[in-house]
Image: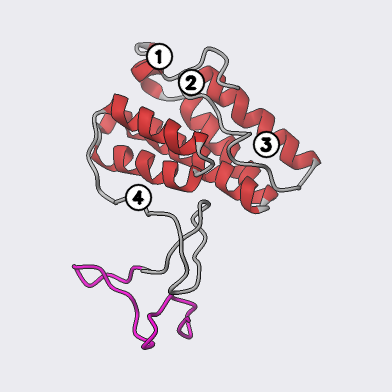
Amino acid sequence: MGDADGQDTGTDGARDRDEEGRARSARPRDGLGRPLPYGASGVERQPEGVVRAPDDTVAEAQRLLDAGMPFHAHEVFEDAWKSGPEAERPLWRGLAQLAVGLTHAARGNAKGGARLLRRGAGGVAEWPGGASHPRLYGLDRAGLARWARALAARLDEDATPVDAAAHAPRLTAVSGER
């Protein structure tokens, strides 16, 4: 159920709100983060605002990507982006954009997916701290950028939704691809 602005509302018509009173959808979500009807069985949502060690962030995001849940991996990267050192924030933001790009590609939004994949590839490959930290946290930034650009090019040619798990990148692999 939604209000006139398209915001999610509970079964009583009132907006779902978090503890601070901000509007937050309490609807269950599928593996790609799409809202499901109230009462439907969805996947467990990623808790927001979790501060993890960087290696734990990479491991958790990889687990979610491998499970075909790039939207949830994006939320893990977003937590690192918001809580990490200022100098690393562009890197984590780029990784979040890669995950959202894969999410859009899996949902069938080829144009938006390609755009975010390219934006994330640029952010990851061109991260200013990269010269002094070429494989920070084991991340294969060059391989990830190649993976993202290749998937974006595929989406330009074929807008068919992709299988998120089958197209998920290896964050720390030498090639950045499976």
Element type at marker 3? helix
- The label on residue 135 is 1
Name the amino acid type tagged 2: Arg
Label 3 or label 4, whichever lies nearer to me, is 4
Q: Do the residues labelled 4 and 1 touch (CB within 8 Å)?
A: no
Q: Main secondary structure of the magenta part?
A: loop
Specify whether 113 is left or right of 93: right
Residue matched to label 2: 141
Q: Are marks 2 and 1 in contact (CB under 8 Å)?
A: yes
Question: Between disc 4 and disc 1, whose residue precedes?
Answer: 4
Question: Between disc 1 and disc 3, whose residue precedes?
Answer: 1
**How far apart are the alpha carbons under marks 1 and 3?**
23 Å
Q: Tell me where residue 11 sits by quadrant.
A: bottom left
Position of the C terminus by quadrant: top right
Q: Which residue is drawn at 33% across and 34% down?
A: 89
**How far apart are the alpha carbons under marks 2 and 1?**
7 Å
- Residue 134, given in percent of the width and then of the height, sits at 41, 12
Question: Between disc 2 and disc 4, whose residue precedes?
Answer: 4
Q: Which residue lies furthest to the bottom in this view?
A: 12
Name the amino acid type tagged 3: Ala
